[in-house]
Image (cartoon, grey):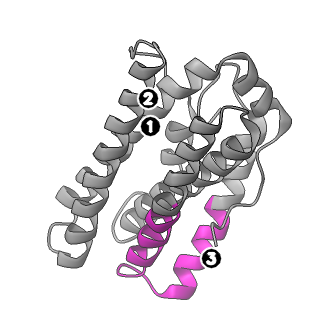
Amino acid sequence: MLHLQSKTNQRWLDQVDQSLAEILIDHAHCEKKAAGTALNLMFAYVEDIELCQEMTEIVNEELEHFHMVLDLLAKRGIKFRRTKPSSYGRKLNDLVRKGEPHRAVDRLLVAGLIEARSCERFSVLAEHVEDQELAEFYRSLFESEARHHTTYTRLAKHFAPEAEVMARLDELAAAEAEIMEEGEELPRMHS
């Protein structure tokens, strides 16, 4: 369903155990960035009415999630602040091909893979953390993130035949798995 080619490893769970507050702060930033990505796609492909309608819904949901995470941080006494982002998104976006329609396909598939990884991470967090309120919070986000992944993948088929889109998704998913394997020192949602 999520088209991921790797699973979260113990290294990331160790980061969660050691720096949960940093992961939560980064999660808020990720929701904000996800809304921005959807908004950018809406501006870039304004002639695709279905895409614009779907992006509007995603923007609204991502901003709602952003505010939910901000509320969670406030409730836990964790100050939201600027942090250095992980290089995950940049590395994936570096794979986007130049020139349309390949650029549209790749932008949508990269956005979908980021949503898929977030979805997978939320599921792992829900099972891993002992804090039941936090576990329930992450379970509640799972469905919308999975739906966003599916939406992005479906919309990529507006710009290329399904077989081509799915082949490119496999290529990008393999690269995403390599990026995840490299990992990062900083504790982030996608480190």
Q: How many marks?
A: 3
User: In the rendering, at what x and y percent does residue 161 appear?
Assistant: 46, 87
Amino acid under disc 2 = Leu
User: In the rendering, at what x and y percent does residue 14 appear?
Assistant: 80, 25
Q: Residues within 10 Å of mark 3 (few under 14, many from 20)?
A: few
State the mark number for residue 30: 1
Q: Which residues are magenta?
A: 146-172
Question: For this view, does 34 lie left or right of residue 3?
Answer: left
Q: Front-most of 42 and 69?
A: 69
CA distance for labels 2 and 1: 15 Å
Residue found 49% across the figure and 71% down from its top: 150
Identify whether 57 is placed above or below 77: below
- Labels 1, 3: front one: 1
Residues at discs 2 and 1 in contact (Cβ within 8 Å) = no
Q: Tag 3, which secondary structure? A: helix
Q: Residues within 10 Å of mark 2 (few under 14, many from 20)?
A: some
The residue pinned by badge 2 equals 72
Q: Tag 2, which secondary structure? A: helix
User: In the rendering, at what x and y percent does residue 122 appear?
Assistant: 61, 47
Q: Is residue 156 magenta?
A: yes
- Labels 2, 1: front one: 2
The residue pinned by badge 3 equals 167
User: In the rendering, at what x and y percent does residue 125 appear?
Assistant: 68, 41
Identify whether 155 is placed above or below 27: below
- Labels 2, 3: front one: 2
